[in-house]
Image (cartoon, rainbow, N blue to C red):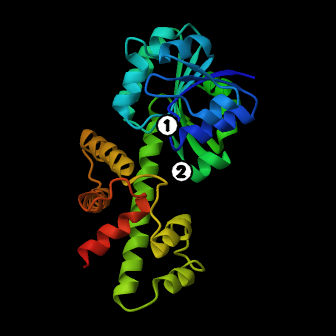
Amino acid sequence: MAKIGFIGTGIMGSPMASNLQKAGHSLFLSTHHGAAPADLVAAGAIALASPREVAQEAEFIIVMVPDTPQVEDVLFREDGIAAGLSPNKVVIDMSSISPTATKAFAEKINAKGAQYLDAPVSGGEVGAKAGSLSIMVGGDEKTFARALPLLQSMGKNITLVGGNGDGQTAKVANQIIVALNIQAVAEALVFAAKNGADPAKVREALMGGFASSKILEVHGERMIKGTFDPGFRISLHQKDLNLALAGARELGINLPNTANAQQVFSTCAAIGGSNWDHSALIKGLEHMAN
């Protein structure tokens, strides 16, 4: 069993860390941004004062924080992970951040003789709790093989996509697809409602045809019931689409439907919905449709 440092025990990170504990691994947590979750400590996790101390104790250090600046902070602050690394330790960033920044972070960590994997996830809070996340990994094959038993405690569909940064690229692609599917379902249900049809019955009918999807099943139900507790917050999906659109500018390509979905998310944020689940994109469309 491995000694694992876990930094970022929020909506996603806490159940992921719990699944590692259930698999028999030892956990080390940092309290630099607040107290460690009581349930993880009660189950045996050791709380330490800084990311550096976590890195000193652990063989693998997992990061699961909201965005690129937070990853950079926990890695390279004065008492950060990099300050506590020694050769052959493995840093696994499971956050969803910039592919370009990831390549730079990996270069700095690898220069210390440690190894770096970017391993963002898809599946939301439900998948995190169930240990059924899809995990998209960037890094070398040998390090991936070392980390695979840990990843298998948190996910089911685990793919080595390529080198450092490629896992993050796959996650950005995932978020484009998810956003556009949410928008498609939301537009269809708004269209149905405006035409006087029962959107719940329309969804039921569509579930049996070619339009059926996980988004229609799960998020379509949320839209019908109006239950928008996250989940995955709109503000975080906006962050991911910003990564997509910034990457598109760097590559000289156009992502028109991604830009449109981002505008609808912005409408949601403007009416107070930044912390709604991303399935609440429908509320932005409803607002525009009066």
Whether tag 1 and tag 2 are in contact, CB under 8 A, the answer is no
Q: Amino acid at mark 2?
A: Gly
Question: Which tag is nearer the camera, tag 1 or tag 2?
Answer: 2
On screen, residue 289 above or below 271: below
Q: Residue at image x 70%, y 21%? A: 2
Q: Residue at image x 27%, y 48%? A: 253
Question: From where the camera sits, is residue 148 visible?
Answer: no
Question: Closest to the observer: 252 or 66?
Answer: 66
Question: From where the camera sits, is residue 174 visible?
Answer: yes
In the image, taking residue 96 as reference, residue 159 lies left or right, namely: right
Q: Residue at image x 53%, y 12%? A: 53
On screen, residue 188 above or below 263: below
On screen, residue 258 above or below 42: below
**Residue 71 at x, y percent in the picture:** 41, 28
Question: Closest to the observer: 20 or 60?
Answer: 20
Q: Amino acid at mark 1?
A: Gly
On screen, residue 180 above or below 43: below
**Residue 206 at x, y percent in the picture:** 53, 80
Quarter that holds the N terminus = top right
- Mark 1 lies on residue: 167
In the image, taking residue 17 as reference, residue 85 lies left or right, namely: left
Which quadrant of the figure has residue 115? top right
Q: Which mark is residue 124?
A: 2
How far apart marks 1 and 2 lie (CA) works out to 17 Å
